């Protein structure tokens, strides 16, 4: 039998987990500075949440969800994105009663999308994201972008671009949609079949199509920014101003529309040229209508999601160095069964003092134990043989200097702590 991981999923093997932990600790550190608290929502939600929240004309809802009936006959879906669950949590836990804005982040949030796997695109990926509820101000939008950029910079990523756009609100978007539709109707024969369908239900999504002919047609399409109402235009100007105040470089890209239906006003993506076609390491925007659409008191909100695997992929492609795992303080080599018992106890005592230690677990010869210790990053190796057993000592070798001395077993911890 040869059981493999499902297509589009990835194990985090022991040699890789240090990178993940580093990314997680950077995220926690940055989030703490902005006063953002962690939240966790279930991996499963009722399917209706996504159908209503993400939008039933989106690719995610139409084609990509992992949906099943549970034993009680309920339609359940594995989270295809992080925002809808957090909005449900906000409403269900009456978080609108807390002081606003209320800022939250999620980390290592498993997201499932039935997509065709390729470099940077998985069927299960993990997102770090933040969601801020209660403020309509563009200062919060800029803060979200700032969090994302700071995390990516602290990890050491380079050559990233922040792309900004505004896709308006229920006042101005319908007028823009009509203009866009009129333009695209004239090129209907050259659009791909998916975009012909989109033309009726969601023309904005055509701007995001990867098909070369569609892209070419969209190049001359009307720009949403020319159709914004005063409120949306003013909001966008403020966002740009706040980004300039805090020194975040951006470019305005009217082709950024995002693949989820809930956005109003601000949308943005952070892209890297170092990971191929799946270039967005993060993306987000404002969704002022979603809380109301999901049954809550209308509440403005903004946030983003960042694919953690993509961040690590960019880091790998750019040769970013991650911190090495901490060295072992002590490895205890022993000769014979009695000496092994003493080695086992010494290892435990050293761990009890908060230090990192190990001894043999393979019945290896003394030579092989030394060889193994040589492969670990070890500060000290202690050796216990018959002579040391009799005198309650160890031969303690400092690996960096090669200096070796006999030390009383009870003094080992103080010696290696020095
Ligand atoms: P999204 O753009 O669909 O937005 O996903 C956010 C990020 O997750 C992407 O920029 C990308 O880095 C990563 N990602 C998406 N799909 C995959 C995949 N198949 N494999 C690997 N990584 C992937 C959202 O999900 C929104 N909920 C973001 C948001 C939060 N907007 C407001 N608040």
Image (tube, helix red, strand yellow):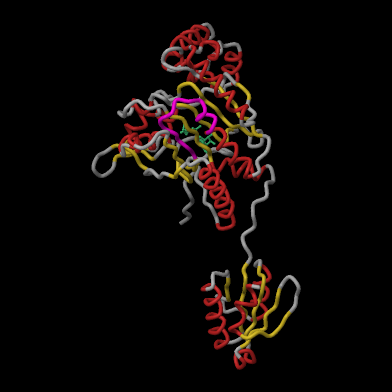
Indicate the quadrant where residue 412 lies.
bottom right
Seen from the viewer's position, the closer of residues 124 and 100 is: 100
* Residue 139 within the magenta-colored segment of the rendering: yes
Q: Give whichever of 49, 244 is nearer the camera.
A: 244
228 in magenta: no
Rendered location of residue 205, percent (x, y): 49, 20
**Location of residue 309 with respect to 139 vertically, above or below:** below
Q: Where does the image place residue 5, in percent across and percent down from the top left?
A: 48, 49
121 up-or-down from 6: above or below: above
Relative horizontal placement of residue 263, taking residue 209 as reference (left or right): left
x, y percent for residue 240: 58, 23
| Label tally | 0
In this rendering, the answer to whether 382 lies above or below 118 is below
Q: Is residue 123 left or right of residue 47?
A: right
Residue lying farthest front?
Answer: 99
Q: Is residue 283 above or below residue 399?
A: above
At a point 49% along the width and 12% down the height, the residue shown is 230
Which residue is most to the bottom? 390
Residue visible at 28% across and 43% down in the picture? 70
Query: For the magenta stretch, what is the residue range?
Result: 129-143
Viewer-proximal residue among 416 and 252: 416
- Which of the image's four quarters has the C terminus? bottom right
Q: x and y percent of residue 396 in the render?
A: 67, 80
Residue drawn 53% across the image and 77% down it: 349
* Location of residue 158 by image quarter: top right
Front position in the image: 239 or 322: 239
Q: Which residue is outermost to the left?
A: 72
């Amino acid at each position: 039998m040869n059981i493999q991981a499902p297509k589009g999923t990835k194990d985090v093997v022991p040699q890789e987990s240090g990178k993940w932990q580093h990314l997680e600790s950077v995220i926690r550190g940055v989030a703490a500075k902005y006063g953002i608290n962690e939240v966790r929502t279930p991996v499963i939600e009722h399917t209706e949440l996504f159908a209503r929240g993400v939008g039933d004309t989106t690719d995610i809802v139409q084609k990509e969800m992992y949906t099943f009936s549970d034993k009680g006959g309920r339609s359940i879906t594995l989270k295809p994105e992080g925002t809808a669950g957090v909005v449900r949590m906000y409403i269900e836990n009456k978080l609108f009663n807390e002081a606003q804005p209320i800022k939250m982040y999620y980390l290592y949030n498993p997201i499932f999308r039935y997509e065709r796997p390729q470099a940077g695109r998985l069927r299960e990926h993990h997102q770090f994201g933040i969601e801020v509820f209660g403020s309509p101000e563009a200062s919060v939008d800029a803060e979200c972008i700032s969090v994302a950029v700071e995390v990516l910079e602290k990890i050491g990523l380079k050559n990233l671009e922040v792309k900004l756009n505004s896709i308006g609100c229920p006042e101005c978007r319908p007028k823009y949609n009509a203009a866009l539709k009129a333009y695209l109707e004239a090129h209907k024969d050259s659009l791909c079949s998916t975009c012909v369908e989109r033309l009726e239900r969601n023309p904005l999504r055509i701007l995001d199509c990867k098909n070369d002919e569609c892209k070419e047609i969209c190049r001359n399409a009307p720009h949403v920014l020319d159709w914004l109402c005063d409120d949306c235009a003013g909001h966008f100007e403020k966002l740009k101003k706040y980004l300039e105040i805090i020194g975040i470089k951006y470019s305005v890209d009217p082709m950024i529309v995002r693949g989820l239906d809930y956005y109003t006003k601000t949308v943005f993506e952070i892209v890297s040229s170092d990971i191929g076609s799946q270039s967005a390491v993060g993306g987000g925007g404002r969704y002022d209508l979603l809380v109301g659409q999901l049954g809550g008191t209308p509440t403005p909100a903004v946030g983003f999601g960042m694919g953690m695997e993509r961040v690590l992929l960019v880091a790998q492609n750019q040769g970013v160095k991650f911190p090495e795992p901490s060295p072992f303080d002590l490895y205890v080599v022993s000769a014979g069964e009695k000496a092994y018992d003493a080695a086992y106890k010494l290892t435990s005592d050293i761990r009890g003092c908060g230090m990192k230690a190990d001894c043999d677990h393979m019945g290896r010869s003394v030579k092989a134990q030394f060889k193994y210790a040589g492969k670990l990053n070890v500060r000290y190796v202690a050796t216990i043989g018959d002579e040391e057993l009799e005198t309650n000592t160890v031969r303690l070798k400092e690996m960096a200097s090669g200096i070796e001395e006999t030390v009383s077993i009870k003094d080992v911890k103080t010696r290696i702590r020095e």
